[in-house]
């Protein structure tokens, strides 16, 4: 079964995750090492999320929110802001 992908939404999530990581000054490798302990998925890689290559699960987003010390509500507010920006760029 093929999964539905909302490309603009994935890109907005990717951008939000990049912004959060940049704010912490961490590298992708550091985030991977620290978060994979909680996620327990060998295939997890933050880089794939930050480039919108994969459709993430709610569980992974939740763990990343905990890691970045942001509520899921605030995370998705940021996603919505980034989605609006990306949508405007796409419509030009």
Image: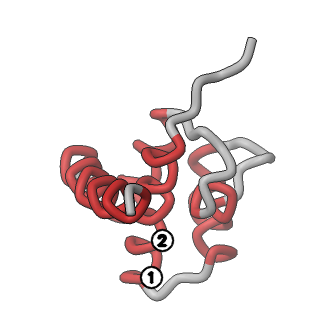
Residue annotated with mark 1: 22
Q: Which mark is residue 10?
A: none
Location of the N terminus by quadrant is top right
Helix, strand or loop at disc 1? helix
Q: Position of residue 79 (x, y in %)?
A: 31, 53
Q: In this view, does 17 lie above or below 55?
A: below
Q: How many labels does the image show?
A: 2
Q: Position of residue 29 (x, y in %)?
A: 69, 75
Q: Which residue lies furthest to the bottom in this view?
A: 25
Q: How many other residues sit within 10 Å of disc 2, few (<14), some (14-19) or many (≥20)? A: some
Identify the residue shown where x is 45% and y is 65%: 15
For this view, does 7 lie left or right of residue 48?
A: left
Q: Which residue lies furthest to the right in this view?
A: 42
Identify the residue shown where x is 48% and y is 71%: 18
Q: Which of 70 and 4 is in front in this view?
A: 4
Q: In this view, does 86 lie above or below 27?
A: above
For this view, does 81 lie left or right of residue 60?
A: left
Identify the residue shown where x is 57% and y is 48%: 38
Q: How many other residues sit within 10 Å of disc 1, few (<14), some (14-19) or many (≥20)? A: few
Location of the C terminus by quadrant is bottom left
Q: How is the image coloured?
A: secondary structure
Cβ atoms under marks 1 and 2 closer than 8 Å: yes
Identify the residue shown where x is 72% and y is 18%: 2
Q: Is residue 92 above or below residue 42?
A: below
For this view, does 73 lie left or right of residue 24?
A: left
Q: Which mark is residue 18?
A: 2
Q: Which of 41 and 78 is in front in this view?
A: 78
Helix, strand or loop at disc 2? helix
Q: In this view, does 6 lie above or below 35?
A: above
Q: Which residue lies furthest to the top in this view?
A: 1
Q: Position of residue 49 (x, y in %)?
A: 60, 55
Q: Where is residue 21 in the image (x, y as percent from the top left)?
A: 46, 74
């Amino acid at each position: 079964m093929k999964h539905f992908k909302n490309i603009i939404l994935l890109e907005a999530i990717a951008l939000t995750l990049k912004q959060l990581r940049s704010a912490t000054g961490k590298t992708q490798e550091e985030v991977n090492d620290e978060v994979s302990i909680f996620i327990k998925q060998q295939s997890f890689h933050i880089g794939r999320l930050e480039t919108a290559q994969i459709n993430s699960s709610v569980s992974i987003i939740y763990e990343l929110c905990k890691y970045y010390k942001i509520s899921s509500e605030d995370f998705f507010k940021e996603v919505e802001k980034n989605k609006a920006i990306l949508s405007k760029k796409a419509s030009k």
